[in-house]
């Protein structure tokens, strides 16, 4: 079984010092993708075409570094084939496709805020599936996040809610949870860039096949793409998404998550929401209204409270160690 780095108590101080800026850089790189994609979609690109172009660019950028990193480690790739497949299909393909589908019909920042309720969803899943009752603090955090989500979606004011956008964003949320869990596995023998590169290549191939057989609608244009600051050639947003918001972002994200653990890394990744709002304003002129901004703030606060309410890996280890010691004592009596 692969070991997962899940808490800061298992991470060295030097790892935190180096991993923190890398995680922030990854969050800001990821955060720009939605705004660039919305420009393409508004110009006539389908979400499927935009995300496929993005992932193919990233996969090609990382192809040579990925092959180089796998020298002498092909056995590790075979041994972790299932994890790599799950990473490519869920953490890469599903997350990005669902997110692009969401930003096609709703503001970039709001779609990402829904996606980042992932820790709350994981909390409820573990409770229902495994009977792992959350702490009181986690329950309070989930309630705060739910209230924030209601305000953010303008349900209180009676505004029309785009149900499809919400569902797409919730799908992206599931993919985001998968991303953090798989990225935190530290004893797979796979270098971070190999996991990112192989996952992106699998995602690119899968999306292309879906497009060719007609499952995923494909449409694009070579016209200039309009943004708030002016128009640019179509390949500018495609390269920005592929090179910076995908290849660089996934590589930095995996490296920093292995340094910080999935718990701390998921905290830092909330900076992606700030980045998405910033780029949504800079590129598209999108800003949430006062009620939506309040709701978004409550979502972030709720997620933080949920994460603070989780048991640490150190505490879990102490409980297991105490159980083992008690068992030995009982056996000696």
Image (spheres, rainbow, N blue to C red):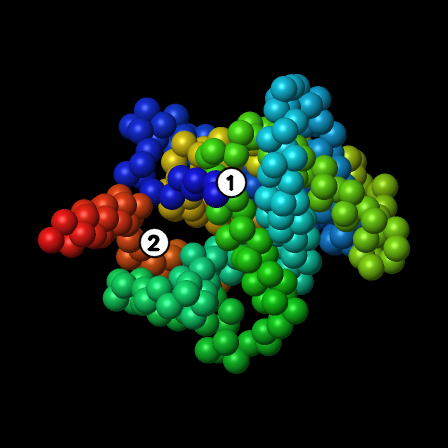
In this view, 40 is above or below 248: below
Mark 1 neighbour class, 10 Å CA radius: few under 14, some 14 to 19, many 20 or more: many
Q: x%, y% of residue 110? A: 53, 59
Mark 2 neighbour class, 10 Å CA radius: few under 14, some 14 to 19, many 20 or more: many
Front residue of 15/111: it is: 15
Q: x%, y% of residue 266? A: 42, 46
In this view, 140 is above or below 251: below
Asked if labels 2 and 1 touch by Cβ distance under 8 angstroms, the answer is no
For mark 1, what is the residue? 183
Would residue 207 be seen by someone viewing this image from the given angle? yes
Q: Under tag 1, what secondary structure?
A: helix
Q: x%, y% of residue 119? A: 43, 57
Q: Under tag 2, what secondary structure?
A: helix
Would residue 271 be seen by someone viewing this image from the given angle? no
Front residue of 324/183: it is: 324
Answer with left or right where residue 5 lies relative to residue 38.
Answer: left
Foreground disc of the pair 1, 2: 1
Front residue of 95/195: it is: 195
- Which residue is most to the left? 333
For mark 2, what is the residue? 307
User: Which residue does the image show at 37% across and 68% down from the upper left?
Assistant: 131
Q: Which mark sits nearer the N-terminus, 1 or 2? A: 1
């Amino acid at each position: 079984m692969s070991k997962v780095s899940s808490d800061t108590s298992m991470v060295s101080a030097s790892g935190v010092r180096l991993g923190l800026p890398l995680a922030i850089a990854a969050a800001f790189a990821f955060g720009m993708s939605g705004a660039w994609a919305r420009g393409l979609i508004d110009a006539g690109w389908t979400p499927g075409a935009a995300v496929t172009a993005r992932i193919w660019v990233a996969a090609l950028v990382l192809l040579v570094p990925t092959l180089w990193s796998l020298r002498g480690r092909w056995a590790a790739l075979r041994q972790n084939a299932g994890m790599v497949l799950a990473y490519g299909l869920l953490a890469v393909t599903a997350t990005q496709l669902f997110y692009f589908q969401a930003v096609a019909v709703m503001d970039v920042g709001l779609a990402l805020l829904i996606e980042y309720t992932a820790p709350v969803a994981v909390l409820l899943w573990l409770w229902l599936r495994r009977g792992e009752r959350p702490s009181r603090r986690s329950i309070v955090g989930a309630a705060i996040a739910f209230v924030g989500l209601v305000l953010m979606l303008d349900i209180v004011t009676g505004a029309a809610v785009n149900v499809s956008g919400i569902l797409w964003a919730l799908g992206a949320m599931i993919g985001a949870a998968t991303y953090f869990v798989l990225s935190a596995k530290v004893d797979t023998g796979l270098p971070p860039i190999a996991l990112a590169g192989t996952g992106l290549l699998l995602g690119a191939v899968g999306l292309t096949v879906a497009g060719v057989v007609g499952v995923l609608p494909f449409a694009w244009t070579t016209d200039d793409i309009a943004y708030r600051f002016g128009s640019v050639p179509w390949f500018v947003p495609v390269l920005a998404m592929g090179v910076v918001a995908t290849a660089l972002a996934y590589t930095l994200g995996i490296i920093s998550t292995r340094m910080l653990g999935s718990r701390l890394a998921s905290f830092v990744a909330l900076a992606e929401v700030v980045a998405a709002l910033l780029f949504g304003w800079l590129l598209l002129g999108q800003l949430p209204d006062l009620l939506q901004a309040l709701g978004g703030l409550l979502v972030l606060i709720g997620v933080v409270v949920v994460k603070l309410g989780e048991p640490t890996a150190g505490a879990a280890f102490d409980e297991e160690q105490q159980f083992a010691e008690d068992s030995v004592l009982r056996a000696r009596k």
